[in-house]
Amino acid sequence: MAPVSQELEPPANPARFSQDWSSEYRQHFALSPTISTRDRDGVQKTFSGLLKLLFPGGGASRDEVEELLTLAVEGRKRVKDQLMRIDSTYPDVKFAFADQNGREVQVKTLEEREHPRWYHRRAAEESREQTIANPGAPSVSPRAAAEQLPMTTEPAHSNGTSGSGPKEDHITFPENQKGVSFDGLFGPWLDGASEITLTDPYIRVYHQMRNLMELLEVIALRKPDGEEVSFKLITAPDPEDLARQEGYLEQIHDGIAPLGVNFVWEFDEANIIHARHIVTDTGWKILLDRGIDVFQRVELNNGFSPASRHQRFRRVKAFELTYLKNA
């Protein structure tokens, strides 16, 4: 049988692929002036390629442009970070961009977010050795020193707490980041509360119930001995298996009650709740981008998997949190 010839459809806008779209982001964002011409060219070429591949017909929104620009800057940052490990004489570079309102987005790699203490360790150690060998030589650069400051695998969380306690903040987490736990996300903001309300319409299946139980365990571990905390869940009934959902909630109630946490729940029968948040009687309100379902799936029934026992070993989905304090 003779092969059937098929004509490939031409792209919607063939001229677009021969054009340079590396400056498309400039109507929304401006790169940091510390980025060198070579690094800037690398960022812009990568951005142009991504834009052509993902939006061949144009029409990328501002948020989509920001996401592509972030990926392009991160790619170039990875190259520059490796070069700086080889040659510490490279000047400091701030891989960031700002929008028209002055909001700055500082780009970090996933490894840098997960292991801020170790990410620039080799460069710091080499600089320290050079300083010891040659006391008159310049000390570690400000950038390298700044990179060594974080001492936790949850750097975003430390931004929301200080020596005087938790504060208002907005933090974001990229897809696949590790080192995140409910204790770091919520613990300091829930301390001292005697009444806590979680509103999340999607507490239905097993892994969501497991997340809820782990949040209650954090509260039980952090509260003073002898004190009790009332925790109320407002969620939507499971239209597929309400009996299973209620069974899970009853087990959670029975399991956490001996630890001094009084757990109750309320179903939103009208199915009108959409926002997800935690509210405390101490005045804190935590806006939950994805509710408490922030972890990627793991084998929770595997007792030999560290990720099934400790949240910090799990990867997360991309999500955001906003901490607000009522006056």
Image: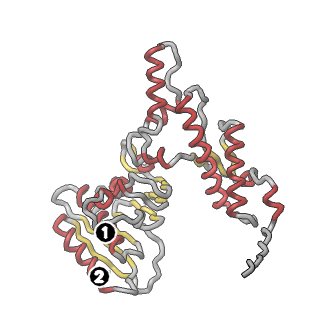
> Could you tell me residue 267's position as x and y percent?
36, 82
Residue at image position (71%, 48%) is 44
Tell me the colour scheme of the image.
secondary structure
Write down the quadrant of residue 208 in the picture. Answer: bottom left
Residue 275 or 141: which is nearer the viewer?
Answer: 141
Residue at image position (72%, 59%) is 52
Nearer the observer: mark 2 or 1; the answer is: 1
Q: Residues within 10 Å of mark 1 (few under 14, many from 20)?
A: some
Q: Report whether 191 appears left or right of 102.
A: left
Q: Tell me: residue 284, above or below residue 75.
A: below
Identify the residue at the far front of this view.
Answer: 1
> Could you tell me residue 170's position as x and y percent?
49, 55
Q: Report whether 29 appears left or right of 169.
A: right
Residue 244 or 15: which is nearer the viewer?
Answer: 15
Mark 2 touches mark 1? (CB < 8 Å): no
Residue 218 seen in this snapshot: no
Q: Residues within 10 Å of mark 2 (few under 14, many from 20)?
A: some
**Mark 1 — residue?**
210
**Mark 2 — residue?**
246
Q: Report whether 319 appears left or right of 279.
A: right
Image quarter in which the C terminus is found: bottom left
> Could you tell me residue 76's position as x and y percent?
62, 44
Residue 274 seen in this snapshot: yes
Give how far apart the Cα atoms at labels 2 and 1 are.
14 Å
Residue at image position (56%, 43%) is 78
Q: Residue type at mark 1?
A: Arg
Q: Tell me: residue 138, above or below residue 270.
A: above
Q: Report whether 192 appears left or right of 118.
A: left
